Amino acid sequence: MAAAFSRTVDSGHDPDSRPVDDAPSSCPRSQAAEFDDEQDFLAGDLRNLLDREALGPLLETLTLREKQILVMRFHRTMTQSEIGLELDVSQMQVSRLLTAILGKLRAPGTS
């Protein structure tokens, strides 16, 4: 590596000035480089899409209050105690409500 660097410096060649087409193949092609391979990246996106499509109709079955609790807990990342203060209920009641709500989402039609 040091030899390659010294050859670059000695030759006066600036490696950053090479054309884009000449980029080494080891350069990341996209944001997918964070994943082990492109299939993992696509599989993650596909899972997210399927989860959203599956949850949409289920969320429509919840009451406004149930939706608000989910938003506070999972979108606003509020603790159960913080939710309880906002709704004027105890943390234990929030825990029970979340358990019931998530139960509805896991097994629709059985609650």
Image (tube, rainbow, N blue to C red):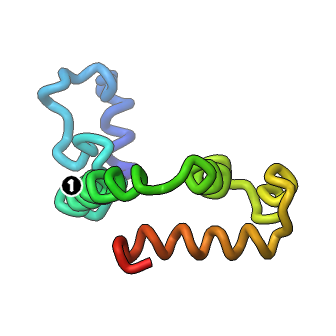
| Amino acid type, label 1 | Leu
- Residue 49 appears in the figure: yes
Q: Is residue 66 left or right of residue 11?
A: right
Residue drawn at (51%, 70%), measured in percent from left and top? 102
Q: Say which of 40 and 48 sits in front.
A: 48
Viewer-proximal residue among 10 and 104: 104
| Count of number-bearing discs | 1
What residue did someone put label 1 on? 42
Secondary structure state at the residue bearing disc 1: helix
x then y, percent, for residue 8 = 32, 33
Corner quadrant of residue 15: top left
Left or right of 51? Residue 78 is right
Q: Position of residue 95 (x, y in %)?
A: 71, 73
Viewed as shown, does residue 72 lie left or right of 35? right
Report the front residue among 47 and 1: 47
User: Residue 57 location in percent, x, y?
Assistant: 32, 53
